[in-house]
Image (cartoon, rainbow, N blue to C red):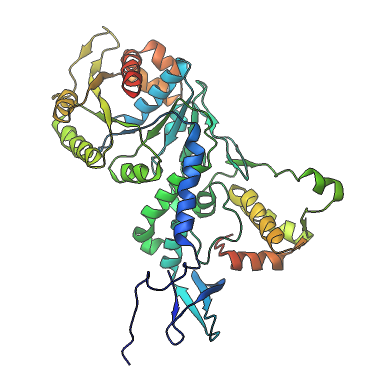
Amino acid sequence: MKFLCIECDELMIFEQRQLPGDGTLAAAFRCPTCQRVVAMLTNPMETQLVSSLGIKIGGRDVPEQPLELVRSEVVGGREDAFVDTEAPLPVEARVSGAGAVVWSLAAVERLEGVPRFVRGMVKRIYADYAKENGISEITPEIMDRARSDLGLEGM
Amino acid sequence: MMLKHRTYADVKGGDSSGMVDQVNAQQARVAERLAGVRACVAVMSGKGGVGKSLTTAAIASACAARGLAIGLLDADLVGPSAARMSGVNPTGLTVDESGVDPATSPAGVRVMSMDLLLDDDAPLAWREPESESFVWRGAQERSALREFLADVRWGELDLLLIDLPPGTQRLIDLAELLPRLDGLVVITIPSAASETAVSRSMSLAAEKGIRVLGVLENMSGYACADCGKVRPLFPGAAGQRLADRHDTALLGRIPFDPDAAGHADMGALDQMMDHTVAGAAIDQIVDRLLEAIA
């Protein structure tokens, strides 16, 4: 999928992705010459179709998680289906204390409200997002931002 | 003003979503995960109610009893039963960022099935919008199958058996997802109705260039628990006829055996294999199947 700025005859560049609500996915593209921004809005069915293919409009920001689609899209998953294990920190990080992302109490409480079927995966995705964006503490606001930026409908 | 449009290829530069790259990466993950699998074999019927899932689970168990490293992937996402039939308890599957460990059956078969993930009695349902689900449901199930292939730590396997649901669409999905599909086992019952439906599936396999390793005729007579003899059950000889028509082997016939069904319901495939007429028939079929794969 390409977006072309007709006036400038330039390929538009992906700018950002948001979930404004009602199952809509908004993806903004900017013309590198005239800076005009256009938004592509998908209806809920189109959003779901793209999601069903396991691809992300605008590209992937964080690594794909194992069984990401199954865990995020299936309704009625067993609470005890998965035992999520934490990725061990590199030795250097453990020694220096660097690299670990801190969760605020409010963020932990919110995470506790996520069904266990998907909770471990959601936690890893938010942690990856924080690392990717140089964020040291995950708060509910960061979770909202990640959810919107990454197009994590339903997480 | 009449706009002059160009084609996708005319506009230089990649699409900024990298859709093709994302799809290629998905395919690469499947290939990488299955690099240690010596053979991938699908089991299909094209018709429901022929006892395919039980037979597949029993074949997997019998192969494991021969010392082979076996995986069993239940591609029937809507009506999953492989885990239960294999005697696997649906308890937590270990997962980290590199993948998910499959469950292991008492016979040592590595099993992945949607029935390990769904609540008891819960149907397979996806998030909304339900109203247009016909548009995306097929893509969703295909992606789930891809994740079962790519994200489960199958490890080194002599054989990965893939139990397909009734119908033919999942076979096409599978053939596109796998780097290679080494063969197909087809299951029928003796009746003419089954023969017609299964024959269509075999024709599709031929069109797709998928090698049919052979035909199994299930419910081929009734194993009498009192006298031990196999009595007639369904009329017809679909197994042999399909094998002849599609130029492949009849791997064997399995009688309907209530004792076998009872063992399978309890997940006791070892008991089924050791103590039933159906189990003995499947054991012989496994020898022929392994020969065909080799």
Query: Nearest the camera: B49 or A69?
Result: A69
Q: Position of residue B270 (x, y in %)?
A: 45, 16
Query: Nearest the camera: B91 or A71?
Result: A71
Residue beneath the point at 35% across and 32% down: B182
The residue most toward the top is: B227
Q: Is residue A8 left or right of residue A125?
A: left
Look at the picture and state if B132 lies above or below A41.
Answer: above
Q: Is residue B154 left or right of residue A130?
A: left
Q: Quadrant of the C terminus of chain B?
A: top left
Look at the picture and state if A8 lies above or below B50.
Answer: below
Q: Position of residue B113 (x, y in %)?
A: 46, 37
Quarter holding residue B197: top left
* Residue A54 in sight from this viewpoint: no
Look at the picture and state if A118 lies above or below B240.
Answer: below
Q: Quadrant of the N terminus of chain B?
A: bottom left
Q: Is residue B115 left or right of residue B202?
A: right
Q: How many marks?
A: 0
Residue beneath the point at 37% across and 34% down: B163
Q: Position of residue A92 (x, y in %)?
A: 81, 46
* Residue A138 in sight from this viewpoint: yes
Q: Is residue B237 left or right of residue B107?
A: left
Q: Position of residue A49 (x, y in %)?
A: 42, 61
Look at the picture and state if B10 lies above or below A125.
Answer: below
Query: Nearest the camera: B86 or B46?
Result: B46
Residue beneath the point at 41% across and 38% down: B80
Query: Nearest the camera: A59 or A66?
Result: A59
